[in-house]
């Protein structure tokens, strides 16, 4: 099986070339490749990037297949240019055992549109009381390499210390949902003038920053790696910068929505804008953009969080937090980082593919576009703009804050190890 990507520009640089992928491997990169038996994808001068890797996705299976399944989540990922995603543990039952993590792994392989790596829970039932069997999950078929109680903070410092020590021995990563729960009780919005005016319970920056600082120190002493989920404040950026300069093995992600939206969106009380951590102020957005460009924040992760209509079409304080992200992520990154001059296409490859793959040790993702490397790539039309239509997304849910918004850049084709997993038709671009 072979695929010929005709007239594409690796990393958006130079003149268009042809890229031939045979048996899952890039075998030729040159002008006018002759491959009569290959499936031809005409790029028309489009940008070619390594397939995207998402360290933070919720696919809801098992347990909430009414909001998303591994099949629909995989389709959304492929349409967004993703070739690998990490499925968070807050399913039902919780992914705190090898039975669940291996099930998710097998279902992902059955669907085959994207590599789905299950994230194992740090604590049993996400309850923060006892460590889950991390070693068993790591040794299973899924080879779990990332552990997180996302949605809940591992708030007990002694338990977090033990988790980091255990993770260091296994060579895996703990991803922390940084939220001191005693500071966020009943909180639903960023603590600031907007929330005060709207009468919404405030969520202080310090709730995130206190945990980031604590866990950086714990990781230092344990000789472990800690990853900060969905960084959202300027103070977190400063703490990450400090920790990295100390040689602490800490990494962090930022979501597309925290790069693009701020708490002014709350004026309508539309619960589609409720997210955890909350949308912050414009100054935080600016700091996160600069940090992503400089590498203080390592990568973009979607925190794709599908919800049923009844869980969002309700009073703001009662709504479930979370937004869709897989199909809009690239466009939002282009709007916030490329069109502002903060990143070029090489930079996009770094934050959406190469760096996330490095963090979790994926050796077959985020690879250079070169002969002999895996044919796992994404074709992006940088010049076409499209209007988001929630009801037309591949996800089973429709809770996107970008509905009806025109965004730049379209993922036209996604290729996983030489197999086309998504190909956009002209009719799909509006």
Image (cartoon, rainbow, N blue to C red):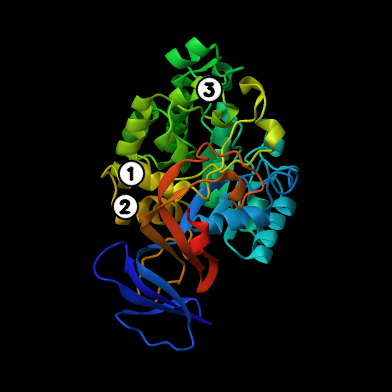
Tell which circle, 2 or 1, labels the residue nearer the N-terminal end. 1
Residue at the spot of label 2: 347
Residue at image point 31% right, 67% down: 9
In 3D space, how far apart are the residues under numbered discs 3 and 1 (Cα atoms)? Answer: 26 Å
The local secondary structure at tag 3 comes to helix
The local secondary structure at tag 2 comes to helix
Mark 2–mark 1 contact, CB under 8 Å? yes
Q: Confirm whether residue 225 shows in the render.
A: yes
| Coordinates of residue 208 in the picture (x, y in percent) | 48, 26
Residue at the spot of label 3: 268
Relative to 164, is 28 on the left or the right? left
Q: Check disc 3: other Cα within 10 Å, few if <14, some if 14-19, many if 20+.
A: few
Which one is closest to the eye, mark 2 or mark 1?
A: 1
Residue at the spot of label 1: 337
Tell which circle, 3 or 2, labels the residue nearer the N-terminal end. 3
| Coordinates of residue 231 in the picture (x, y in percent) | 44, 34
Residue at image point 53% right, 82% down: 1
Q: Check disc 2: other Cα within 10 Å, few if <14, some if 14-19, many if 20+.
A: some
């Amino acid at each position: 099986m072979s695929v010929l990507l005709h007239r594409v520009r690796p990393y958006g640089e130079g003149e268009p070339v042809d890229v031939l992928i045979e048996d899952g491997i890039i075998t030729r990169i040159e002008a006018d490749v002759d491959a009569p038996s290959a499936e031809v994808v005409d790029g028309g001068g489009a940008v070619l990037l390594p397939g995207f890797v998402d360290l933070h996705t919720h696919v809801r299976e098992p347990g909430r297949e009414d909001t998303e399944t591994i099949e629909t989540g995989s389709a959304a990922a492929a349409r967004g240019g993703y070739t690998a995603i990490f499925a968070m543990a807050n399913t039902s039952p919780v992914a705190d055992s090898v039975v669940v993590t291996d099930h998710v792994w097998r279902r992902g392989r059955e669907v085959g549109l994207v590599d789905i790596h299950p994230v194992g829970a740090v604590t049993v039932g996400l309850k923060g009381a006892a460590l889950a069997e991390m070693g068993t999950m790591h040794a299973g078929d899924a080879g779990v390499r990332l552990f997180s109680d996302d949605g809940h903070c591992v708030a007990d410092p002694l338990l977090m210390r033990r988790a980091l020590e255990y993770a260091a021995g296994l060579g895996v990563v703990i991803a922390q949902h940084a939220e001191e729960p005693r500071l966020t009780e009943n909180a639903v919005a960023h603590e600031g003038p907007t929330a005060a005016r709207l009468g919404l319970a405030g969520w202080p920056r310090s709730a995130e920053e206190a945990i980031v600082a604590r866990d950086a120190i714990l990781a230092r002493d344990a000789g472990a790696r800690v990853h900060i989920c969905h960084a959202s404040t300027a103070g977190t950026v400063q703490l990450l910068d400090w920790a990295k300069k100390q040689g602490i093995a800490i990494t962090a992600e930022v979501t597309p929505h925290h790069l693009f939206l701020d708490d002014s969106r709350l004026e309508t009380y539309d619960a589609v804008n409720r997210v955890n951590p909350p949308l912050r102020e414009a100054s935080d957005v600016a700091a996160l953009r600069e940090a992503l460009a400089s590498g203080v924040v390592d990568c973009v992760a979607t925190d794709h969080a599908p919800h049923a209509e009844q869980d969002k079409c309700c009073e703001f304080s009662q709504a479930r937090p979370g937004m869709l992200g897989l199909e809009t992520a690239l466009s939002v990154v282009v709007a916030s980082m490329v069109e502002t001059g903060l990143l070029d296409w090489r930079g996009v490859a770094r934050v959406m593919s190469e760096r996330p793959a490095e963090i979790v040790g994926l050796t077959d993702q985020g690879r250079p576009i070169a002969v002999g490397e895996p044919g796992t790539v994404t074709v992006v039309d940088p010049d076409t703009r499209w209007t988001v239509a929630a009801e037309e997304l591949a996800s089973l849910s429709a809770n996107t804050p970008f509905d009806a918004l025109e965004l730049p850049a379209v993922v036209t084709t996604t290729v996983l190890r030489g197999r086309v997993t998504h190909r956009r038709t002209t009719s799909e671009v509006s």
